[in-house]
Image (tube, rainbow, N blue to C red):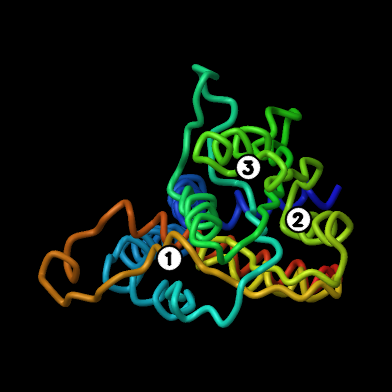
């Protein structure tokens, strides 16, 4: 039930959905003052959420600093890679269709090759709401093998459907005594780290695939709306609501 409710809530609070609902409401209501207020609210939110400079600045504040490989203090028994980085149900099925989060598995493999990670655990089942779907962890394991990771050095956990279960099932698979580093997206590190901490499993965090970037106060970024800015806000708002929801239900 929580899984379904969270998907519905995420849909309702996405910026583009809020904007569309406000504008549609302005067409439906008959009271002229309310109609005007709803219209202005929709247009105002559209201009705010589509501004590139505001979106990138907010994302920069949220994402932690990158960790250089040479700054890692020691080697790790396990590198835990959180799934959610491919399109597992997109044909043809003879390849892995990565999205931007591919850095999670790529950086884990790089650290394995550098000898900083001894083994890799890929955690992730199906995050599809309406059907089970294909499980990413199997495809990511095959990709790691293709990149030269030894079969005995890569394992999968394919039952988790969210970050809470990633942490819970990874802890059950590895226990609390291993020295682990967690690979996940930079925007997701706070929630992921809190979930693993809740299980009693200590992990270091390795942020990947950053969405923020340099701020340039050019006319282009200041004045021209961009669809990409709406995407950044959707990612941030979803993550913030996830943190609050996880705190309420006791996952963190």
| Image-based side of 163 in relation to 49, left or right | right
Residue 128 sits above or below residue 164 on the image: above
Q: Position of residue 60 (x, y in %)?
A: 39, 76
Residue displayed at 70% across by 51% down: 121
Residue displayed at 70% across by 28% down: 133
Mark 2 element type = helix
Marked residue nearer the N-terminal end (3 or 2): 3
Q: Which residue is mark 1?
A: 37
Residue displayed at 78% across by 48% down: 3
The disc at residue 166 is: 2
Q: Position of residue 201 (x, y in %)?
A: 81, 72
Mark in front: 3 vs 2:
3
Marked residue nearer the N-terminal end (1 or 3): 1
Q: CA distance from mark 3 to mark 2?
A: 23 Å
Q: Position of residue 241 (x, y in %)?
A: 65, 66
Q: CA distance from mark 2 to mark 1?
A: 43 Å
The reply to whether residue 62 is in sight is: yes
Q: Check contact, mark 3 vs mark 2: CB within 8 A.
A: no
Q: CA distance from mark 1 to mark 3?
A: 61 Å
Residue 156 sits above or below residue 93 on the image: below
Residue displayed at 55% across by 36% down: 143
Q: Check contact, mark 2 vs mark 1: CB within 8 A.
A: no
| Image-based side of 164 in relation to 72, left or right | right
Q: Image quadrant of residue 212? A: bottom left
Marked residue nearer the N-terminal end (2 or 1): 1
**In front of the other: 16 or 231:** 231
Residue 76 sits above or below residue 19 on the image: below
Mark 1 element type = helix
Mark 3 element type = loop
Q: Which residue is mark 3?
A: 150
């Amino acid at each position: 039930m929580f899984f379904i409710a969270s998907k519905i809530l995420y849909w309702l609070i996405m910026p583009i959905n809020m904007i569309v609902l406000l504008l549609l409401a302005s067409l439906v209501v008959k009271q002229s003052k309310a109609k005007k207020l709803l219209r202005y609210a929709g247009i105002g939110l559209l201009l705010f959420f589509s501004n590139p400079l505001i979106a990138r600045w907010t994302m920069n504040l949220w994402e932690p600093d990158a960790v250089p490989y040479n700054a890692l203090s020691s080697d790790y028994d396990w590198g835990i890679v959180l799934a959610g980085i491919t399109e597992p149900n997109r044909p043809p099925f003879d390849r892995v269709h990565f999205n931007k989060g591919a850095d999670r598995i790529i950086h884990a493999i790089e650290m394995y090759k550098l000898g900083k990670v001894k083994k890799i655990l890929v955690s992730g089942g199906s995050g599809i709401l309406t059907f089970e779907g294909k499980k990413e962890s199997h495809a990511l394991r095959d990709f790691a093998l293709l990149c030269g990771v030894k079969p005995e050095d890569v394992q999968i956990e394919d039952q988790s459907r969210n970050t809470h279960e990633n942490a819970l099932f990874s802890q059950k698979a590895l226990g609390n005594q291993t020295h682990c580093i967690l690979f996940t997206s930079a925007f997701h590190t706070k929630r992921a780290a809190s979930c693993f901490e809740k299980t009693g499993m200590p992990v270091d965090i390795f942020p990947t695939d950053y969405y923020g970037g340099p701020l340039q106060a050019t006319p282009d970024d200041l004045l021209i709306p961009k669809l990409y800015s709406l995407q950044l806000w959707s990612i941030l708002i979803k993550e913030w609501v996830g943190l609050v929801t996880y705190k309420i239900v006791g996952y963190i």
